[in-house]
Image (cartoon, rainbow, N blue to C red):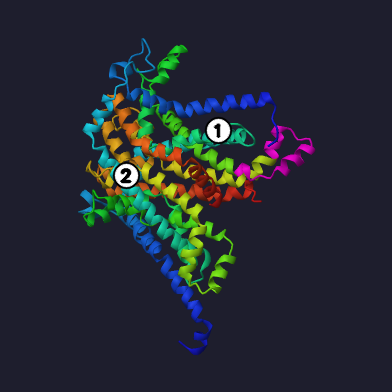
């Protein structure tokens, strides 16, 4: 707003630092516990903050009992395919809804809005029965299935396209481009930031979703990181160092991606909020 | 087609129609198959008692709904879900708003703070809940250890029926504060500085400025955050699923509608009853949405 006095600035930093600590401490505790022995993790007198010896054996133990490489593969394949589908189909539909006139446009866009207003659980049983009747349970396809198209993505990108100036399109049309060429060569490059935002949303949502993979891919070789963690917890609920090691294994790839692309993450979320 | 009509619909218009239909086709076909038809199917199934995996369906009319109304579990779940939303939504928005206002403007380390506050949003709820369970552990948890140093007794965070929902709400708040803050901060940055300068000339204090300038101009962003937060809170599942199993003494005081839906549909394979539960959730969300849309006209000011 305007210049703050030194004392105010100091007080603000103190408050924000406390908040930052609260955000970080659970993760720090996760990492510290994952390197302790069970005895150390449950020792209160004396209280053990840092492990006396950093035990990688917790990691090798959970790695041996669970095939995390397959989980990484399943999760990234699901995320990649969902991003591909939602970007491609949503961008196409969004452009048509934003710029083209055709009979049924408002009705069809109403369908998109309607889907967004309904709680997603309402789709789950029929979607499960569809996957089941296709004999596709425990496959990557099953993981991608509910995300083949995205109403949210269509809505988000439509807002982006509507915010773009019309002059370039008209110039391209005069140059003899047809509608498809205008879309691919002129509009898509302009909507890059919107597509990045949608990609991030899709990835985060797919990564965090637990219920769908739990329901549709019950075999442990077809699980995702999220759904596998739920199983691991019930399998050995007392060994917290190993549970924490499993958690660290599950979340570090996304954390790295976040740290590398934090600007895109935060700006993507921020702009999409303004668009909705 | 008559000549007159053919003239009205020119070739380029027809061309545009075809392109429009072609471009929306995948999304619309997908939405119809994946979402629109399933809504009808879920409604349809809610009138059936289903055996294993949808086989051996038996039409029971409104029996599922009658059972729903007299089922204590359902009423527990409605109460818990609403209570959870009431705890999480206002608290997380107020904390996010305070953090956003403090960060708005020139502040060293602003983007670092923003990055850190957003981290809980990145982590899988399953992993997050596991570490919180460990922090909440009655005997060895970090939180009770801290409390004991202050001379406070151990709390059964995850098993005490009076406490467990609060523990779950704390995780919910912790997870979502950063997300809400990012959205509100973006809204704050769009408020032109002139408004603050003008109100300063009028002799408004900081607090008055916040009430007269910040809140009204931020109201569209606040409304968006409110709507998304409520919808998310009403669908709470992961954290409760990971923290409270069916044997937990706090189960009745924490089970949410979606958790109940999951148990009935996929654990007990009674998809008919599960469908009825999800229709109830739909009804509740619709009612809340209508109330919000009405209230919106009263307090949200679009520039």
User: Circle 2 sits on which residue?
Assistant: A75
**Rendering coords of residue A174 (x, y %):** 55, 74
User: Circle 1 sits on which residue?
Assistant: B95
Front-lying residue, A186 or B7: A186
Residue drawn at point x = 38 percent, y = 13 percent: A47
Q: Would you say residue B211 sits in the magenta stretch?
A: yes
Cα distance between the residues tagged 1 and 2? 33 Å
Residue drawn at point x = 58 percent, y = 45 percent: B221
Q: Residues within 10 Å of mark 2 (few under 14, many from 20)?
A: many
Left or right placement of residue A206 versus residue A231 in this view: right
**Rendering coords of residue A31 (x, y %):** 37, 26
> Residue A10 lies in what quarter of the image?
top right
Circle 1 sits in a helix, a strand or a loop, which is it? Answer: helix
Q: Would you say residue B110 sits in the magenta stretch?
A: no
Q: Residues within 10 Å of mark 1 (few under 14, many from 20)?
A: some
Compared with residue B55, is residue A185 higher up or lower down, i.e. above or below? below
Region rendered in magenta: B187-212
Left or right placement of residue B30 versus residue A65 in this view: right
């Amino acid at each position: 707003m305007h210049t703050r006095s030194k004392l105010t600035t100091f007080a603000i930093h103190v408050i924000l630092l406390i908040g930052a600590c609260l955000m970080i401490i659970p993760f720090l505790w996760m990492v510290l516990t994952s390197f302790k022995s069970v005895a150390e993790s449950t020792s209160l007198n004396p209280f053990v903050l840092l492990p006396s010896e950093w035990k990688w054996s917790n990691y090798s133990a959970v790695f041996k009992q669970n095939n995390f490489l397959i989980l990484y593969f399943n999760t990234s394949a699901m995320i990649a395919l969902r991003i591909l589908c939602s970007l491609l189909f949503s961008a196409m539909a969004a452009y048509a809804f934003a710029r083209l006139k055709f009979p049924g446009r408002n009705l069809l866009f109403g369908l998109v809005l309607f889907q967004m207003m309904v709680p997603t659980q309402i789709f789950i049983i029929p979607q499960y029965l569809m996957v089941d009747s296709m004999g596709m349970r425990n496959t990557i396809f099953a993981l991608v299935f509910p995300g083949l198209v995205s109403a949210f993505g269509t809505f988000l990108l439509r807002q982006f396209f509507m915010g773009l100036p019309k002059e370039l399109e008209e110039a391209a049309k005069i140059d003899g481009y047809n509608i498809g060429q205008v879309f691919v060569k002129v509009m898509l490059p302009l909507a890059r930031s919107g597509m990045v935002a949608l990609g991030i949303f899709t990835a985060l949502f797919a990564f965090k979703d637990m219920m769908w993979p739990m329901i549709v891919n019950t075999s442990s070789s077809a699980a995702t990181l999220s759904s596998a963690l739920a199983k691991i917890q019930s399998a050995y609920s007392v060994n917290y160092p190993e549970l924490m090691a499993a958690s660290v294994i599950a979340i570090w790839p996304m954390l790295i991606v976040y740290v590398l692309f934090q600007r895109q993450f935060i700006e993507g979320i921020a702009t999409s909020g303004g668009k909705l | 087609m008559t000549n007159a009509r053919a003239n009205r619909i020119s070739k380029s218009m027809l061309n545009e129609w075809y392109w429009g239909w072609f471009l929306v086709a995948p999304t619309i076909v997908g939405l119809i198959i994946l979402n629109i038809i399933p809504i009808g199917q879920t409604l349809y199934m809610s009138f059936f008692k289903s055996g294993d995996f949808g086989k051996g369906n038996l039409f029971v009319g409104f029996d599922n709904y009658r059972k729903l109304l007299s089922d204590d579990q359902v009423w527990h779940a409605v109460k818990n879900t609403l209570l959870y939303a009431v705890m999480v939504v206002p608290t997380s928005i107020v904390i996010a708003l305070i953090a956003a206002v403090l960060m708005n403007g020139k502040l060293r380390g602003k983007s670092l703070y923003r990055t850190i506050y957003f981290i809980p949003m990145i982590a899988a709820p399953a992993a997050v809940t596991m570490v919180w369970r460990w922090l909440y552990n009655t005997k060895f948890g970090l939180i009770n250890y801290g409390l004991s140093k202050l001379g406070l007794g151990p709390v059964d965070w995850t098993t005490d029926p009076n406490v467990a929902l609060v523990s779950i709400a704390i995780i919910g708040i912790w997870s979502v504060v950063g997300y809400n803050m990012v959205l509100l901060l973006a809204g704050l940055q769009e408020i032109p500085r002139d408004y603050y300068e003008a109100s300063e000339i009028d002799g408004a204090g900081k607090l008055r400025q916040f009430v007269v300038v910040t809140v009204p101009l931020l109201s569209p962003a606040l409304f968006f955050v409110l709507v998304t937060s409520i919808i998310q809170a009403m669908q709470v599942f992961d954290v409760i699923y990971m923290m409270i199993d069916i044997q937990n003494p706090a189960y009745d005081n924490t089970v949410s509608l979606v958790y109940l839906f999951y148990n009935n549909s996929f654990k007990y394979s009674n998809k008919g009853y599960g469908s009825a539960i999800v229709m109830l959730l739909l009804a509740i969300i619709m009612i809340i949405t209508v109330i919000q849309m009405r209230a919106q006209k009263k307090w949200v000011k679009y520039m």
